[in-house]
């Protein structure tokens, strides 16, 4: 069978990902930045920012000069690799062989797969449309060689499907970079006036080898199918599941509990063997009348502890209506993570009792009101309040730095400061009273100001002067005035948080 490959290119992977998480950023010029050589450098660029002249590798200060209102996100280490691996595992539904490729892309070995979707064109359209539906902008191409598929997905301007034996003709109009040559080799060819593949591909191999080097020559041979290219697919994720058939239909709560306990025993034995723990599990109950009942539980950290997982399922047993009876149960570990041996100590009677109670409480609350109701935050190395904390998904993520204790901070911080009306005796004094959400608060005690300057390397704008205020009822608030007081303009006052 002739090998066929599909290359999928995520040109704006990181900016697409953050927009999926934060829809308010959609259509805004957006970049990711990271520190390099004592200055902030742009590491990822959205389409909107690129159209305004911003590019990867540009100093952030230069980008801000071009677009003053540029939205800047701090770079996250290895996030691209993690995203590509997750999307690659998702793509296994289309091909069992998926590899992560250089330059934010995936390669699928689609040999013998496309006919299941009615042909390569329909197959490609299905994958591209699904990924775009998830929020990612992608380009894709199909060819006999990985190199040609890579080139056409990034630089092609005509058909994305290259027929067998037509690799060279599909490449002729493309620039040297399309062959995955080294940057130095591509620059050499362009300086010599060889700006398309057609202008140099017919040159004698010995001459071309002297110009661009052995490594780049190997790339040319790979893209033309003259030399085999290594394909390293990602490992298929392990499937953790258990199945229990009933001798007689189960109609009672006790019977359902026994079934869940047996399934968890099977599932957790498999998980512990591989050093894995459940983050999300799915119980499927098949009734004899043909109805399927799905029950999902989630945990704040990986666990293979049967008693703890059973408690989470027991909270939802009332949702399982057996009616005439359940004849089959299946349980799948929908999401698993590596299990830290120390984590299991949280569930022991003698060790980590305090942590055990916290974890069990959070898991039970999530089971009752939903996981979205529970959020955890960790400190970040920023003094600007909105950037001083970050939301994390796991209870197990360690502190990278201690919580700041040298200054009092509110227990509840508003995502966006809200404007208030104030009355102050003189400009730099705290308010005597303020009005918030239609209620006037008489200030009895005040402390401040504490000036917090903007992080100029990330954004421009006015500083803030914060005050801690206590009203007549003893409630405490965190208010600030934006910028210097001026007789020419009114300084805005905002409420930003609430103290305990």
Image (spheres, rainbow, N blue to C red):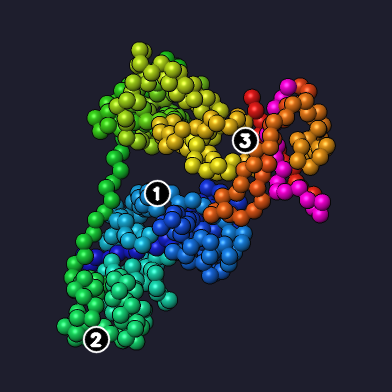
Q: Which marked residue is nearer to the observer: mark 1 or mark 2?
A: 1
Q: Is residue 287 above or below residue 168?
A: above
Q: Of 260 and 104, which appears nearest the observer?
A: 104
The boundaries of the magenta stretch are 474-489
- Estimate the x, y position of residue 112 in percent, counting from the top left: 27, 60
Residue at x-position 38% and y-position 68%: 153
User: Which corner quadrant holds the C terminus?
Assistant: top right
Q: Are marks 1 and 3 in contact (CB under 8 Å)?
A: no
* Whole-number angstrom distance, CA of label 1 to CA of label 2: 42 Å
Query: Residue at label 1?
Result: 77
* Residue at the top extreme, as displayed: 350
Question: For the point 29% across and 56% down, which residue is it?
Answer: 99
- Residue 270 percent location from the top left of the image: 27, 30
User: Residue under circle 2?
Assistant: 202
- Vertical order, 230 against 485 (above or below): below
Image mark for residue 264: none
- The reply to whether residue 316 is in sight is no
The residue lying at 81 percent from left, 28 percent from top is 442
x then y, percent, for residue 380 = 49, 40
Direction left: furthest residue:
206
Judged left or right of residue 38, residue 416 is right
- In 3D space, how far apart are the residues under numbered discs 1 and 3 (Cα atoms)? 26 Å
Magenta span has 476?
A: yes
Q: From the image, tell me which residue sits under label 3.
A: 413
**CA gap, disc 3 and disc 2:** 65 Å
Q: Mark 1 or 2 closer to N-term?
A: 1
Q: Residues within 10 Å of mark 3 (few under 14, many from 20)?
A: some
Mark 1 in CB contact with mark 2 (< 8 angstroms): no
Question: Front-most of 82 and 128?
Answer: 82
């Amino acid at each position: 069978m002739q090998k066929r490959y599909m290359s999928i290119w995520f040109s704006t992977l990181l900016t697409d990902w953050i927009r999926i998480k934060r829809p308010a950023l959609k259509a805004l010029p957006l970049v990711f930045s990271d520190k390099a050589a004592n200055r902030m450098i742009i590491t990822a660029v959205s389409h909107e920012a690129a159209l305004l002249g911003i590019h990867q590798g540009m100093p952030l200060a230069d980008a801000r000069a071009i677009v003053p209102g540029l939205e800047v996100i701090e770079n996250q280490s290895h996030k691209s690799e993690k995203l590509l691996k997750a999307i690659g595992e998702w793509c296994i539904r289309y091909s069992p062989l998926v590899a992560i490729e250089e330059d934010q892309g995936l390669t699928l070995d689609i040999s013998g797969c496309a006919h299941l979707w009615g042909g390569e064109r329909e197959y490609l359209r299905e994958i591209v449309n699904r990924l775009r539906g998830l929020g990612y902008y992608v380009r894709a191409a199909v060819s006999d060689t990985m190199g040609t598929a890579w080139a056409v997905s990034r630089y092609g301007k005509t058909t994305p499907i290259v027929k067998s034996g037509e690799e060279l003709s599909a490449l002729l109009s493309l620039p040297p970079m399309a062959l995955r040559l080294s940057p130095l080799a591509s620059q050499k060819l362009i300086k010599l006036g060889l700006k398309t593949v057609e202008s140099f591909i017919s040159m004698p191999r010995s001459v071309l080898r002297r110009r661009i080097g052995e490594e780049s020559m190997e790339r040319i041979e790979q893209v033309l199918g003259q030399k085999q290219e290594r394909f390293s697919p990602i490992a298929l994720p392990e499937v953790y599941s258990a199945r229990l058939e009933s001798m007689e239909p189960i109609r009672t709560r006790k019977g359902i509990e026994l079934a869940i306990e047996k399934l968890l025993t099977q599932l957790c034995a498999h998980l512990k063997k591989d050093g894995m723990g459940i983050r999300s599990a799915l119980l499927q109950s098949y009734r004899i009348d043909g109805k399927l009942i799905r029950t999902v539980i989630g945990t704040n950290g990986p666990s293979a502890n049967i008693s703890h997982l059973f408690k989470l399922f027991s909270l939802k047993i009332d949702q399982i209506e057996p009616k005439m009876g359940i004849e089959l149960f299946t349980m799948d570990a929908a999401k698993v993570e590596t299990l830290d041996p120390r984590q299991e100590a949280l569930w022991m009677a003698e060790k980590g009792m305090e942590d055990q109670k916290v974890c069990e409480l959070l898991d039970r609350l999530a089971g009752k009101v939903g996981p979205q109701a529970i959020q955890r935050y960790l400190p970040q190395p920023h003094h600007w309040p909105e950037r001083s904390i970050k939301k994390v998904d796991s209870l197990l993520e360690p502190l990278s730095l201690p919580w700041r204790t040298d200054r009092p901070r509110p227990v509840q911080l508003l995502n966006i400061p809200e404007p208030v009306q104030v009355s102050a005796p003189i400009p730099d004094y705290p308010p005597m009273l303020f009005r918030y959400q239609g209620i006037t608060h008489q200030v009895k005690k005040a402390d401040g100001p504490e000036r917090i300057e903007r992080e100029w390397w990330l954004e421009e704008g006015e500083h803030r002067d914060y005050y801690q205020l206590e009203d007549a009822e003893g409630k405490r608030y965190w208010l600030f005035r934006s910028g210097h007081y001026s007789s020419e303009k009114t300084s805005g006052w905002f409420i930003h948080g609430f103290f305990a």
